[in-house]
Amino acid sequence: MAILVPSREEIESLPTKLTNGESRLMNALLEALDDGWTVYVQPHLNGLKPDIVIFAEDGGVGIFEVKDWDLGCYRIRDKKWQVYDASSRNYVEEKCPLEQVKKYKDSIIKYEMPVLGAEIALNTEKYSLIQTFVYFDRHTTFEIQEKIQEILDGHTRNNVFGYDKLNPHSLRNSLASKYLKHGSKFTPWMQSNDLENRLRNALAYPKHGATDLGNLLAQAESKQRDLLPNSIGSRRVLGAAGSGKTFVLVHKAVNAARDGKRVLVVCFNITMVNYLRDLITRLARYYDPHCHRMIQISHFHRLFPEENSDIDTEIIKDPIDVLLIDEGQDFERSWIEKCQSLCAAKYHLMFFEDGRQNIYGKSIRARESVPGIRGRQNKLNKSKRLPKQTAELANAFSRWSKQESQSEDVTSTKAVQGDVFVKNVWFDGTKSTAIKAIQDDLQALTLDPNTARADIAVLVCSVEDGWEICKVLDALHLPCQRNFESQDENRKLYQQYKGDTNKFKQELDNLRRCYKAGFWMQGGRIKVSTIHSFKGWELSNILVFFNANDSQIEKAALLYTAITRSQQCLTVYNTDLDFYDFGNLAISEGYANSHPQRESTQLQTRKNSSSEVIRIPEYDEIPF
């Protein structure tokens, strides 16, 4: 028998009770499938609500839309569904269930499991990993197919079925005809990409233990407690790195949902969506099995796509009571106003920002004049995450680079005993010497029995530099997890659209968004990420390959952001001539140790000849 998620007890307490058709299909799937399959009932897909989803790691994904319709009241005209409306004595248009279930599939591929979307961009065969079905509970399969034959084709005919297919043998055959059976040729790929846990997280049923609830259940500090009420009005919070902005946001979202309020959490960085959802869902389910259904989490460009999109037209159905914006320094004022347009007449808004991480150069003054925000700013500047040494290094760099920001210096409150193993190291040199130093350090780190590979991240300024790091890791036979395409994938895509530069760039943008959205911090591999996409994350061992190109005008904010990602050990490999002086300062003041391979004797000579250095512009980093 298949595994049921959630439990029958939780299903019985669902806000929306199962229909007869949903209940019958659920029981039929449980009986027909073995325990290698999981049956998810009424999962919460971040605003979209498929009726049933099934998954097996060696089989694939099935999505079911269930209809208890009497088809005698429906008809198809011009390939559109219509239902008879007794009040007007006329037929009115009805949503097509086949299109509805395909929408769930496309949303999962594009937003919830984008690692699959990235793979499909390069191998369209994998689109068949997710299959869609519509089950009509009051009719036989023959009756349904006769009724809607106008909109069926050879591909979709087996995707609709009736109650005569609910017996175990027929149901297994129906699923197998759409490749949903054990032994999928894509099994190794699904396992290596941890598709099971990715789907559980997407459907709001993460496994317990993967994220430590201890930090979320810790006592809030006085300044944090002052920010927890969700009373009507708008507030702006300036928070230093590691000061608990996410802690406050998560608790505010869950508290509002427990009070029956509709909550929207918006961030800018695609890679942060899964992280925020994981934290919020775990805390919400700790208190209540269903209150997470009141919370929707999205990055801004999913809510307001630049291109026309019909995937998420239903993500915001009702006015929002509580709007929480993370990474506010990355937002333009007009974007905040667009988010406000989704809110009820009386709503609560809080947006969090750290001006020192303003890596896209957004206007501070414009954000100050956001409608509805009055009074002084709320400030958080105590960090339990940043070690004292790293906080001092970050503060010194911010002062030295004269960053324009309203954020204050960060003060570390991390336990002193945790600083024993903290080490900051600074390297200055050329690109080639930096890469050699990184290779030597990675080899030493991975040989250290006290360092887990999963706790190592290499941060880069561009995808091209990321490829260089991946070559280093390949040479060391160290598998990695990256949030951008490989160089081979880039070449393959280029060959696919050779001659059509615009199409190539469009597909490359889509591919990179998939990789960003699918970035997965769980797993035992070394992480390789652009600094842009790692904003909001942190790990014990951070190696920063800082080789910024001339188009990255906010270099100081970029390096500050990278420095503040470290929980313990930080090494900066700087090739930027503009920051050599700070390297000398950091070492002389004791903020960092000099790297053994640092080219100290050549620094002044290279700085004097900096006018001879020519950088080739690289393909722009995709920010969202």
Image: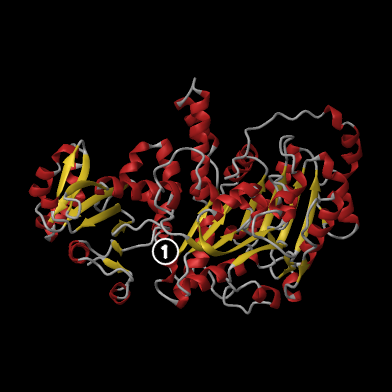
Other-residue count near label 1 (Cα within 10 Å), few / some / many at <14 / 14–19 / ≥20: many
Q: Is residue 426 above or below residue 26?
A: above
Kind of residue sitting beneath label 1: Ala
Percent x, y for residue 256? 51, 71
- Residue appearing at x 87%, y 60% in the figure: 590
Residue 269 in sight from this viewpoint: no
Q: Is residue 352 left or right of residue 13?
A: right
Which one is in front, 576 or 217? 217
Which one is in front, 549 or 57? 549
- Residue appearing at x 84%, y 57% in the figure: 396
Residue 356 in sight from this viewpoint: yes
Q: Is residue 412 above or below residue 358?
A: below
Q: Is residue 565 left or right of residue 270?
A: right
Which image quadrant for residue 551?
Answer: top right
Residue farthest along the bottom direction in this orientation: 219
On the image, numbered disc 1 is attached to which residue? 204
Percent x, y for residue 192? 43, 52
Number of numbered callouts drawn: 1
Which image quadrant for residue 452?
Answer: bottom right
Q: Is residue 468 above or below residue 371?
A: above
Quadrant the N terminus occupies: bottom left
Which one is in front, 117 or 338? 338
Percent x, y for residue 29? 21, 62
Q: Is residue 548 left or right of residue 122?
A: right
Q: Dot 1: what SS?
A: loop
Residue farthest along the top direction in this orientation: 499
The colour scheme is secondary structure
- Residue appearing at x 73%, y 62% in the figure: 240
- Residue appearing at x 42%, y 44% in the figure: 117
